[in-house]
Amino acid sequence: MATGRRSPTLESVAAASGVSRQTVSNVINAPDRVAPPTRARVQSAIESLNYSPNRMARSLRTRASRAIGFCVPPAVPNRLNPVLDRFVHAIADAASARGFHVLLFTAPAGPAGLDGYAELMAQQAVDGFALSETVVNDERQAWLMERGIPFVAFGRTWNDDDSGAWVDVDGAAGVAAAVDHVHGLGHRRIAFLGWPRGSGVGDDRLGGYLAACERLGVPSLVARGTESMAEGHAMASRLLGGPEPPTALVCVSDTVALGALRAVARRNLAPGRDVAVVGFDDTPFAALPGFELTSLSQPIEEAGRTVVRMLLKHLERKGSRRGEAHEPGEPPATNVLLRPTLVIRSSTDPEASRLAR
Amino acid sequence: MATGRRSPTLESVAAASGVSRQTVSNVINAPDRVAPPTRARVQSAIESLNYSPNRMARSLRTRASRAIGFCVPPAVPNRLNPVLDRFVHAIADAASARGFHVLLFTAPAGPAGLDGYAELMAQQAVDGFALSETVVNDERQAWLMERGIPFVAFGRTWNDDDSGAWVDVDGAAGVAAAVDHVHGLGHRRIAFLGWPRGSGVGDDRLGGYLAACERLGVPSLVARGTESMAEGHAMASRLLGGPEPPTALVCVSDTVALGALRAVARRNLAPGRDVAVVGFDDTPFAALPGFELTSLSQPIEEAGRTVVRMLLKHLERKGSRRGEAHEPGEPPATNVLLRPTLVIRSSTDPEASRLAR
């Protein structure tokens, strides 16, 4: 798609077909007024230049597309991203309820993918964007803000400077609630199985753990590994085989926690009775019989609704001052931090789980 | 959304603002040619009538939107639909590779939702549709064909009459391959755990089982229950506690199979050694340690690519005979039936699984 070239205009179509702008406009809007040979010449110029008459609508500065763009990260076959998939459903539902649609597109990660956003705006295919899979120092936000392109992100950039409107889930508060939960059950040697340093989400969750340990006056014990069951298994095995093994493993994700659960079982320890295990995300795996993993559930549907509501409010503000649309320097947006909910199952509390059945 | 009312036209905007059609067109395409007070009057009429200038582009009959509509079924919180989610990724990827986008929308099930499709076409928001979640006697196909709206379905309607273009996965062939697999391992009492009669997908899979049993000369034994682990557990328990218990349970889905696996374990039988269990869909659950469920993997990415390719070919055909676009009675489409792959794990063959590690 021609992102680098200049977009064809009414003028260039007129020049290419040797007629006036008005005639081109007539071909588009009132073709019966134009003699068939002229009409054919103009239509052929429109096609060869790949001119999109939708672009004309730009001057109106109405929100004609009523669509929200959402970039889908490349699918990894047989690897689920339940949080992302729930979020896509959530914004599609929320947008539909407001008479909007969600336009999915794909783009390379990093700066290379940014042209795709600008192009969709130029084509008036979308009115703005919902972002997700935000990373530390994400470049998209600043790039979109500079161009006055409306967006709301699901997830922070963890930058110090203003990075636009976002909705996020308070991972630190969630992990702190998990630590409080196992502490309340009597655990005092509580370890955290986290991701490598430098991921915004992982560091946020770790921060909640460290703060809770300090508040409760218990020692902290942190292991780090990548996002996989194998690493969860390895981290848990190492800690459980150490000199002062923890009795509770608070994990940065369900995937890591499922690996930890297996390490507990391999040592003939009973999850929930001997060693408590907590995950994060409350994926469908967590609820499976045989795992019954206590986990933190993210309010994804609420996040989707909030992202759509904030974005539509932003678009309304833009719409109310037509002439100045697309100018940089939007007022700093209100950001929303949602609380995850701890779903207690038998991996921390066999009694709670039994009662729930 | 005003599906019942007549759409505003250039004429109605002209009438409402007391100017000519040409002046309305000028306000949209060349606002600098129109005196500010007139421009303001026309813009106010455009807004109060909710007139979308994109609709003007209709007369051009070019494919301006380059978007494929896809209706997302309502999300059920904490219930995954991995096949659907993979399909959404697959069509987004395949469409992007061809310079198209996927427009997600939601619509009520049944005839009530059909207006949403027509409206998106009328708005030129999409060029055609990808359908999924097709059901027996699905009404969408006939409705879309009558209106000449391009679509390709992922899934059949199981109607006798022509129901338009589709891509589907051969469930019967997949289940037959599963029966052959357990038969080859020596099993002779092979049961099928299916869904209630009347679902196209479920009956198709059952048909493959019955045909394979007949071909192999082994008795058939069918249980039916709804799509849940609890029903899978109940069906398997009933069969395993019967007079001539089966030694292999071929299941209509992974969910049913996970319930069956638990029923096997509850009777202190070893899955894979004592009783073979096969699922369908190869969901991420199947690969989990502790389950290691043999299952049939659907080629979803290939299905998505094929749906997009067929739809774009359809659009090209339409585009090449401009004047007659949207006429009913498209030529019968070629349909594509893809083969699922049996992924063998320890629930049928402990050796195979061990070697794979």
Image (spheres, coloured by chain):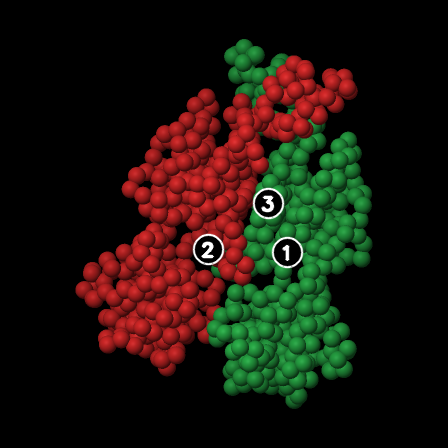
Chain colours: A red, B green
Q: Which mark is residue A226?
A: none
Residue shown at 47%/41% (left/top)?
A112
Q: From the viewer's perspective, tell me whether residue B224 is left or right of residue A7.
A: right
Residue A55, percent from left and from top: 58, 27
Crowding at dot 3, Cα within 10 Å, few <14 / some 14-19 / many 20+, comes out as few
Residue shown at 36%/66% (left/top)?
A278
**Helix, strand, or loop for circle 1?**
helix
Nearer the observer: mark 2 or 3; the answer is 3
Comparing A245 with A274, the one in front is: A245
Asked if labels 2 and 3 share a chain, the reply is no
Crowding at dot 2, Cα within 10 Å, few <14 / some 14-19 / many 20+, comes out as some
Cα distance, mark 2 to mark 3?
Answer: 25 Å
Give me the chain letter of mark 3. B
**Helix, strand, or loop for circle 2?**
helix
**Farthest-out residue, bottom:** B243
Q: Is residue B35 above or below residue B189?
A: above
Q: Is residue A146 above or below residue A224?
A: above
**Helix, strand, or loop for circle 3?**
helix
Give me the chain letter of mark 2. A
Circle 1 residue:
B302
Comparing A143 with B218, the one in front is: A143
Residue shown at 29%/42% (left/top)?
A160
Q: Are marks 2 and 1 in contact (CB under 8 Å)?
A: no
Cα distance, mark 1 to mark 3?
Answer: 14 Å
Among numbered discs 1 and 3, the one appearing first in the sequence: 3
Q: Amino acid at mark 1?
A: Glu
Circle 2 residue:
A83
Circle 3 residue:
B97
Q: Classify residue A237 by image quadrant.
A: bottom left
**Farthest-out residue, left:** A217
Residue A339, percent from left and from top: 35, 53
